[in-house]
């Protein structure tokens, strides 16, 4: 005790960075963001500016037993996603859909995707690996965070209608009995896609990286050619790799998450408090911020007019972001879309 | 179809409310502030716990998602810092859903969410939990323009209307606080920013009391006197206060 007193000549309350961050995370982040000398050059605790996203890194095809897979790394968050197709036979469906199968033309391009939802042809699952995040207790049931994430991913997969039901149908055309008879096509089976997402490490922004991994894995997916064999009366898959077909995805929606950091309102705040909307929050910032906004945009659809389409806006937890702020966030999401789309494209050509 | 609210009818809970609207009926119960488990205790804030029970079947990840949305929204309006190291437990039991609900083709999370929020708020009011503001919430559906009504926006549609207007292009859920701040927005489908802004403005008109004194327009009258949500909320609270002040008023 005595030696400590003599050794320190600095003011009594001075902590090194990590201790300050642990004791008072809110004022730690605020001290970083409110830089009085250069207000527009303020940085967050992780060295990024408020509008800066982390650059994603994507590798596909890492898992050999999947039909498609991707590893996505965004800062310290890394996610693996594997897509595996399994065959669901039409005779095993208790209540088969009555809709007529597509006739092969492109007229029904936009309709008839109800099977994806009603037959549950998309089965996403999410797992937080042991040790991926301190709040994850191994061996227990999926936490409510994980369950929320998986609901959001499933709902986004369905509401963006990214997959076409015709890609997942296994259609059989019986040989015509008479030459001029129009053969009626029957759906003999469906591909069910099991989309498994695993977080190796989680440093904030779980949804964006998980979604990016799902997107990359689906783009990488090649399903073998499956056909109904009349003699054996069963579904067979061709083992010729060149016959495997990729999925045709509709558009390329990219999610961007923002966290809203509100400055302290109590205490000796004299001037108006300031709020910061932080792009791509990490785990520390997520712990401090209550309000979060997630915007999913897709610019593929309206490429000609340069008009972006919003696929989803999710905002909860506070009242800072209103209509005007949202305009700015949509703009930031569109910028993010350009970057992510570029990275996804680069993966495809490699 | 009018909004119906009964407050403080469960005598064992600290606060309770039953809310009925458009075929949805939800019972909400609030216990709090009560003792919190050591694991969930926060030194400077109250812990808010939301449990949602379905009308049929057991809970699924979908309910966890709804719970987290309701939790995040309520946490921002409950004065959690004034009751630190306590627990506010909110239980919402859905007792009935409209029959057409499953067939409407809209994510049930969207259509149910405003009702859950209203029920939770009423139950919190009934339990006299300190709140910074009230909230009102509404769902808006935009049918695909191919439909007969040429893409008219539907405000707080019933399940039947949704079924008739199928396919739906976009659905939005908005919640506004008493001071006209956007507390929650859940939008899905395909839309542009301007459409979202329009829907948001429309929701604000319904949710928040008109300051300018301009009428809400004819379509509101057609809706069967649903009127303004904040006014409705005020009338509910007024009734509650009158009820509690009976002993003073009675002579």
Image: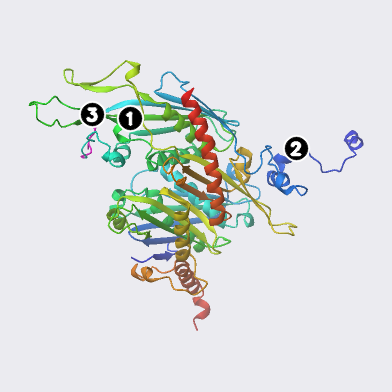
Q: Which residues are magenta?
A: A92-98
Q: Position of residue A303 (x, y in %)?
A: 44, 42
The residue tagged 3 is A171
SS at badge 3: strand
The chain identifier of the residue carrying mark 1 reads: A
The chain identifier of the residue carrying mark 2 reads: A
Label 2 close to label 1 by CB (< 8 Å): no
Going from the N terminus, do you reach mark 2 or mark 1 first?
2
Q: CA distance from mark 2 to mark 1?
A: 50 Å
B151 or B99: nearer the eye? Answer: B151
Give the quadrant of residue A227.
Answer: top left
Q: Position of residue A6 (x, y in %)?
A: 92, 36
Q: CA distance from mark 2 to mark 3?
A: 63 Å
Report the predominant secondary structure element of the magenta stretch. loop
The answer to whether any part of residue A144 appears in the image is no
The magenta stretch spans residue B171? no
Query: Which residue is painted at 75% across and 37% down in the image?
Result: A17
Instruction: Point out the residue furthest to the bottom here.
Output: B251
Tag shown at residue A192: 1
Tag shown at residue A17: 2
Going from the N terminus, do you reach mark 2 or mark 3 first?
2
SS at badge 2: helix
The colouring scheme, among rainbow, by chain, secondary structure or one colour, is: rainbow
Q: Are marks 2 and 3 on the same chain?
A: yes
The chain identifier of the residue carrying mark 3 reads: A
Q: Are marks 2 and 1 on the same chain?
A: yes
Q: Position of residue A87 (x, y in %)?
A: 29, 26
């Amino acid at each position: 005790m005595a030696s400590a007193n003599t050794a320190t000549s600095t003011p009594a309350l001075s902590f090194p960075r990590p201790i300050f961050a642990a004791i008072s995370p809110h004022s730690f982040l605020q001290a970083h963001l409110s830089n009085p000398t250069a207000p527009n050059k303020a940085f967050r605790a992780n060295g990024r500016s408020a509008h800066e996203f982390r650059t994603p890194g994507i590798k596909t095809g890492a898992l050999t037993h999947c039909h498609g897979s991707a590893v996505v790394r965004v800062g310290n968050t890394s996610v693996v996603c594997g897509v595996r197709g399994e065959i669901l036979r039409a005779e095993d469906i208790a209540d088969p859909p009555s809709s007529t199968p597509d006739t092969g033309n492109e007229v029904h391009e936009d309709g008839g995707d109800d099977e994806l939802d009603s037959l549950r042809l998309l089965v996403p699952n999410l797992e937080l690996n042991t040790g991926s995040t301190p709040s994850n207790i191994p061996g227990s049931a999926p936490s409510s965070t994980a369950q929320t994430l998986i609901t959001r991913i499933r709902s986004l997969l369905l509401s963006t209608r990214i997959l076409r039901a015709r890609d997942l149908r296994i259609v059989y055309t019986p040989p015509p009995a008479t030459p001029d008879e129009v053969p009626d096509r029957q759906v003999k089976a469906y591909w069910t896609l099991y989309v498994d997402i695993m977080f190796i490490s989680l440093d904030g922004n779980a949804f964006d990286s998980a979604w990016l991994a799902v997107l990359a894995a689906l783009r990488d997916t090649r399903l073998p050619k499956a056909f109904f064999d009349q003699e054996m009366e069963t579904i067979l898959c061709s083992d010729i790799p060149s016959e495997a077909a990729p999925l045709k995805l509709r558009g390329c929606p990219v999610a961007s998450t923002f966290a809203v950091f509100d400055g302290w309102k109590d205490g000796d705040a004299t001037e108006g408090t300031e709020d910061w909307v932080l792009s791509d929050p990490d785990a520390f910032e997520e712990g401090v911020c209550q309000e979060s906004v997630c915007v999913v945009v897709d610019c593929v659809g309206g490429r000609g007019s340069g008009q972006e389409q919003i696929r989803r806006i999710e905002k909860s937890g506070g009242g800072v972001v209103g209509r005007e702020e949202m305009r700015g966030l949509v703009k930031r999401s569109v910028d993010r879309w350009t970057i992510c789309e570029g990275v996804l494209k680069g993966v495809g050509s490699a | 179809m009018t909004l119906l609210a009964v407050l403080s009818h469960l005598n064992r809970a600290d606060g309770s409310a039953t809310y009925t609207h458009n075929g949805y009926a939800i019972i909400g119960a609030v216990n709090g502030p009560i003792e919190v488990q050591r694991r969930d205790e926060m030194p400077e804030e109250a812990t808010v716990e939301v449990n949602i029970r379905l009308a049929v079947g057991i809970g699924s990840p979908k309910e966890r998602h709804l719970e987290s949305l309701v939790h995040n929204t309520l946490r921002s309006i409950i004065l959690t810092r004034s009751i630190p190291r306590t627990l506010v437990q909110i239980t919402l039991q859905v007792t009935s859903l409209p029959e057409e609900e499953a067939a409407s083709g809209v994510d049930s999370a969207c259509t149910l969410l405003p009702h859950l929020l209203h029920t939770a708020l009423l139950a919190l009011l009934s339990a006299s939990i300190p709140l910074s503001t009230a909230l009102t919430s509404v769902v808006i559906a935009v049918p695909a323009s191919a439909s007969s009504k040429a893409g008219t926006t539907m405000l707080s549609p019933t399940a039947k209307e949704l079924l008739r207007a199928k396919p739906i292009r976009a659905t939005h859920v908005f919640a506004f606080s008493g001071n006209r701040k956007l507390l929650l927005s859940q939008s899905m489908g395909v839309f542009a920013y301007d459409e979202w802004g329009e829907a948001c403005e429309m929701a604000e008109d319904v949710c928040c009391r008109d300051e300018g004194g301009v009428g809400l327009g004819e379509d509101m009258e057609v809706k069967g006197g649903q009127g303004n949500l904040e006014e409705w909320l005020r009338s509910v609270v007024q009734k509650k206060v009158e009820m509690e002040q009976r002993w003073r008023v009675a002579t």
